[in-house]
Image (cartoon, rainbow, N blue to C red):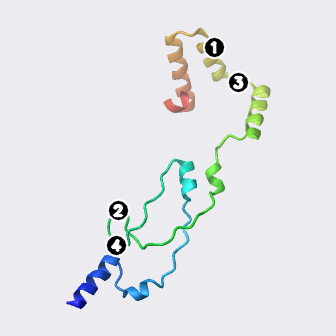
Amino acid sequence: LAQASEAQARLAHGSRHPPCQQGARQPRASAKPTEAGRKAMGKSAKPERSGLAAGLNKGFIVTRREMAPKPSYAKGRKSQRNGLIKEVIREVVGFAPYERRMIELLKIGSASTFKRALKLAKKRLGTHKRGK
């Protein structure tokens, strides 16, 4: 009877090894973002592991390390320097022909010309979302 309950406890823990050996395992370093990094990306923190082999929060219980946010998470963020560079380039180069045509259509201001401008933007840029 004692052996059966011990076997069930091991299976619930998700390992065939005795519990004394399981405690010797070292927690693995995670390359995933920290709670602060997740909040910056709009994700919530992961729930703690249950220690069970199955279920939503399955897995070995380890202490989570705080990791610094990766520089790649800042990619695409508008900086003051890049904004200034883009502004200077826009002044020097001006608008593309399709952009000039769209501006002219928008200056007219009616609903049909607005629709035509969006249609032109969609055709040139590929998708409705980009055209908006």
Which residue in the protein does label 3 denote? Answer: 95
Ranked by sequence position, the earlier of labels 1 and 3 is 3
Q: Say what secondary structure mark 1 lies in.
A: helix
Q: CA distance from mark 1 to mark 3?
A: 12 Å
**x and y, in percent, of residue 77 in the image:** 65, 43
User: Which is more foreground, mark 4 or mark 1?
Assistant: 4
Q: Nearer the viewer, residue 79 or 5?
A: 5
Ranked by sequence position, the earlier of labels 4 and 3 is 4
Which residue in the protein does label 4 denote? Answer: 53
**x and y, in percent, of residue 81 in the image:** 77, 40
For disc 2, the neighbor class at 10 Å (few under 14, some 14 to 19, many from 20) is: few
Amino acid at pointer 1: Glu
Which residue in the protein does label 2 denote? Answer: 56
Which residue in the protein does label 1 denote? Answer: 104
Which residue is rendered at x = 59% and y = 14% of the image? 106
Q: Say what secondary structure mark 4 lies in.
A: loop
